[in-house]
Amino acid sequence: MAEIKTQTLDSYLRLIEISRDLASTLDLNTLLDDIVRASADITHAEAASIMLYDDTARQLYFQVATNIDEPTMRGLVVPLDKSFAGWIVTNRKSLRIDDAHKDERYFSDVEQTIGYSTKSLLGIPLITKNKVVGVLEVVNKKRGRFTDPDESMLTVLGAQAAVAIENARLFQQSDLIAQFVHELRTPLASLSTATYLLLRPEMSREQRDQIVNNIHSETLRLNSLASSFLDLARLESGRVQFRKTRFSVADLIYECCDVMTSKAQETNVQIRVEVPSDMPLMEADRDKIKQVLLNLLSNAIKYNRTNGSVIINSNFSETEESITIQDTGLGIPEESTPHLFEKFYRVREHEGTASGTGLGLSICKQIIQGHNGRIEVKSKMGVGTSFTIHLPRSSRIMPRTIESQ
Ligand code: ADP
């Protein structure tokens, strides 16, 4: 009994500590990680997870857990009508279960896929301003059953977590939308000037052609701005689910080179590929890694010099695989490198050399981090730049999730 009391006291202290942190974190991913870890700690559960609820799509998405392979699980839709979490959202009530397998809401498909067995479960709805924003669950009490103090502590944590999640989301959205609208202004201004000029009778045939060309390239830029923006918004909201397969790195690199051949020919840039013959298969979302490589390769050509070259090589160690794209281009000033992966950031020195949105590298970073990897850059002005992506090798144990649906 005394032991239980000490445990509860520890948990209260932990709760106070985490509440302070929650209020000050605006990064959604860090926030969600903190919440699941604290939830498992204070209730002495084996694991904890959060599903976020999208009110408009009326869908529940898996987000984070203390024990899952996030790249694969993140964004996974959790069925509203066949899961404990769905029940919690629909009924807006907490749920405590001692033996999940005996419950009619128990749905074993996901459990089988991920191989984690749920015995006991405690879940609460995350509600703010009368809106359900998600579900917080802890599973498998380490000793005994989940208790009333567990439930009340999780409820307190959940109430604060809901507000913090909502704040972080609003901040994320307003930040992104404000920047996007700002970025729209420049191409819109030049389109409007262009049309005004076209209407002037004194414009020569040649001038008109040039203006039409301008309109064409500005529309292309707007188009790519719109799709990049959507990509990034999806990635940032955590709703993108990475679909992992095993594939040959060499095949993927050659495929990317094929796509870029004509662009490289325009400025006579040579592309060379070096892949070790024993390069192991990569386990990742192939399409997403392709998107990253195309982006880096396109930059390596775009910011290169005429007759320059690009070398793509890959490497591996026991723990990771890497791909480097190195160019002989303009290089990036030292003071710009810390900002390269920020949204809409473009190097001032390159303005006028090539058109772009400043979103490509942010997208690359989101994708690589979503795979638990990292992206690095080295550059020397006037000599060239190299970007390297590092991805963990798949030998690590596939972690398990906790929601029994
Ligand atoms: P953009 O659409 O502007 O190319 P990115 O996010 O892909 O956007 O890149 C951000 C900025 O980083 C670019 O505007 C460019 O100034 C710089 N940059 C990216 N890749 C290279 C490279 N290989 N060499 C030199 N500068 C680069």
Image: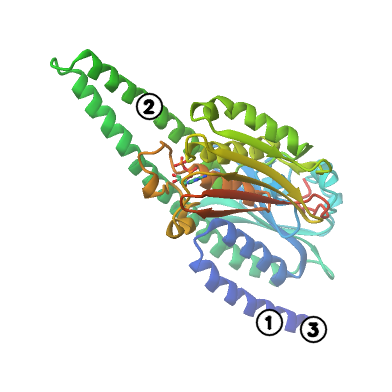
**The quadrant where residue 258 appears:** top right
Which marked residue is nearer to the observer: mark 1 or mark 2? 2
Instruction: Indicate which disc residue 9 carries.
Output: 1
- 10 Å crowding of disc 3: few (<14), some (14-19), many (20+): few
Residue displayed at 77% across by 66% down = 45
- What residue did someone put label 3 on? 3
Q: Are marks 1 and 2 in contact (CB under 8 Å)?
A: no
Amino acid on which the number 2 mark rests in the picture: Ser
Amino acid on which the number 1 mark rests in the picture: Leu
Question: Residue 116's x, y, as percent?
Answer: 84, 53
Residue displayed at 48% across by 59% down = 338
Secondary structure at numbered mark 2: helix
Residue placed most toward the observer, 100 or 299 = 299
- What residue did someone put label 2 on? 217
Question: Residue 401's x, y, as percent?
Answer: 77, 53
Image position of 150 with respect to 264: above or below: below
Residue displayed at 53% across by 26% down = 265
- On screen, residue 107 versus residue 9, left or right, reads right
- On screen, residue 15 versus residue 116, left or right, reads left
Secondary structure at numbered mark 1: helix
Amino acid on which the number 3 mark rests in the picture: Glu
